[in-house]
Amino acid sequence: MTVLYDYFRSSAAYRLRIALNLLGEEYESVPVNLLEGAHRGAENLARNPQGLVPTLEIDGRVLTQSLAIIEYLDEVRGAGFLPGEALGRARVRALSYAIAMEIHPVCNLSVARFASENSGGNISMQGWMQTFIPKGLAAFEAMLDHADTGDFCHGDSVSMADICLVPQVYNARRWQVDMSEMPRINAIMARLEAIGAIAAAHPDRVA
């Protein structure tokens, strides 16, 4: 049995729920409550030394880091999350990293909370998010102004970039980020959210 150690609002875990759902891979979801500090407990640290989620038990192995896992699923399950040609793979990775390595780390809940709690009241959580999420998504919107953008971030099939985009837009909406000037992202999101496997991974559906 495939087991996903999950937290419903974790962007990284959300990515894996989307990927597994798109594959039709059956899995057991085991919650790791970040708000209660379960990720720092001995049980979670034993499977994920970084003290993070997600962790995926699959094919007799224990895997960590969402993008590495998505690439593994692409390689061993023929998922199609990355294009067949090198330039296409480079573009999908660049789009994915723009979210997972640029926006996500700065807007991680622990980072935002630290900034808020140590600002002497000058920075709110929402103010932090509304500063950094729009900058990152505006850059992503510009990256989509490209000949290889199709119905989705790259071409006309769902890629790793789309899998990264969905949780990031969820967070933008949660923090009431104005996305009215991001027509490409909004159009792609409308298509993605119409896909049953993606809709089923939404935090409101799994909490």
Image (tube, rainbow, N blue to C red):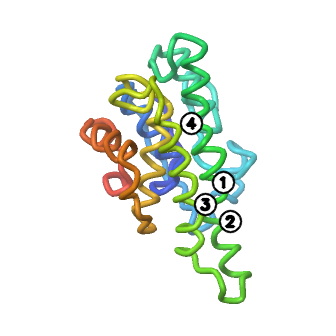
Residue in the image at 52% along x and 54% along y: 10
CB of mark 2 within 8 Å of CB of mark 3?
yes
User: Horizontally, is 195 left or right of 61 in the view?
Assistant: left
Q: Which residue is mark 2?
A: 111
Q: Position of residue 127 (x, y in %)?
A: 56, 75
Q: Amino acid at mark 1?
A: Pro
Q: CA distance from mark 2 to mark 1?
A: 8 Å
Considering only order in the chain, which callout, 3 or 4, is on the residue closer to the N terminus? 4
User: Horizontally, is 147 left or right of 34 in the view?
Assistant: left
Q: Nearer the viewer, residue 8 or 133?
A: 133
Q: Amino acid at mark 3?
A: Cys
Residue in the image at 38% along x and 30% along y: 26
Q: Which residue is mark 3?
A: 107
Q: Which residue is mark 4?
A: 96
Q: Amino acid at mark 2?
A: Val
User: Horizontally, is 109 left or right of 114 in the view?
Assistant: left
User: Element under label 4?
Assistant: helix
User: Element under label 3?
Assistant: loop
Which mark is on residue 105? 1
